[in-house]
């Protein structure tokens, strides 16, 4: 059974497969560092102390300040996450996000995808790897 949580910026769902999904609300057009901190605080409040792989669906409409990108990629921005798959729907966003990830390396495995199926498969592999290393 899926659990959901709505905030002023993002819709969250924890799936029965143990994947945290996030989708920005359509009215979110600009993300600065204070908003990034609020988004992470809301996510952590929802997920509690459990760690999850995250699938975030990027609408492509939002612009991120440099400080917001640095915060999301930093220690606190990835707190409670085991990996991040970013789902993008257009080539411009894909190219831009790929470039940014090459420069601002996140602290956890992070990849960009154009197909939801591929993103979910990658997150499931991350979960399997984590279980194997814990055994």
Image (tube, rainbow, N blue to C red):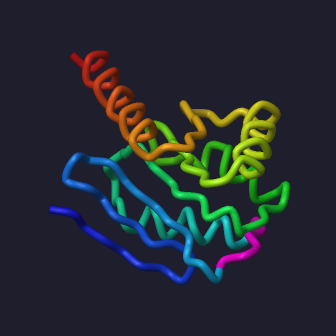
**Residue 111 place in picture, x, y as percent:** 58, 35
Q: Which corner quadrant of the image does residue 73 belong to?
A: top right
Tally of numbered discs: 0
Q: Is residue 117 left or right of residue 4?
A: right
**Residue 14 place in picture, x, y as percent:** 30, 59
Q: Residue at x 71, y 69 (%)?
A: 61
Span of residues in magenta? 28-33
Of 48 and 128, nearer the camera is 128
Q: Residue at x 44, y 48 (%)?
A: 54
Q: Residue at x 78, y 62 (%)?
A: 64
Of 37 and 8, nearer the camera is 8
Of 132 and 90, nearer the camera is 90
**Residue 28 place in picture, x, y as percent:** 66, 77
Q: On screen, 74 above or below 44? A: above
Q: Pick the quarter of the image with the N terminus.
A: bottom left
Q: Pick the quarter of the image with the C terminus.
A: top left
Q: Is residue 28 left or right of residue 15?
A: right
Q: Is residue 13 left or right of residue 34?
A: left
Q: Residue at x 54, y 49 (%)?
A: 87
Q: Is residue 30 magenta?
A: yes
**Residue 112 place in picture, x, y as percent:** 60, 39
Q: Which corner quadrant of the image does residue 118 belong to?
A: top left
Q: Which corner quadrant of the image does residue 130 belong to?
A: top left
Q: Is residue 57 magenta?
A: no
């Amino acid at each position: 059974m899926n659990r959901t949580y709505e905030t002023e910026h993002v819709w969250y769902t924890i799936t029965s497969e143990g994947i945290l999904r996030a989708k920005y609300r359509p009215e979110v057009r600009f993300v600065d560092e204070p908003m990034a901190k609020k988004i992470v605080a809301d996510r952590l409040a929802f997920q509690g102390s459990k760690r999850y792989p995250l699938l975030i669906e990027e609408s492509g409409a939002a612009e991120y300040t440099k400080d917001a990108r640095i915060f999301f990629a930093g220690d606190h921005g990835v707190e409670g996450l085991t990996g991040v798959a970013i789902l993008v729907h257009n080539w411009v966003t894909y190219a831009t996000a790929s470039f940014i990830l090459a420069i601002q390396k996140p602290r956890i495995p992070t990849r960009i995808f154009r197909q939801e199926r591929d993103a979910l498969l990658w997150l499931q592999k991350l979960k399997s790897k984590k279980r194997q290393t814990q055994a």
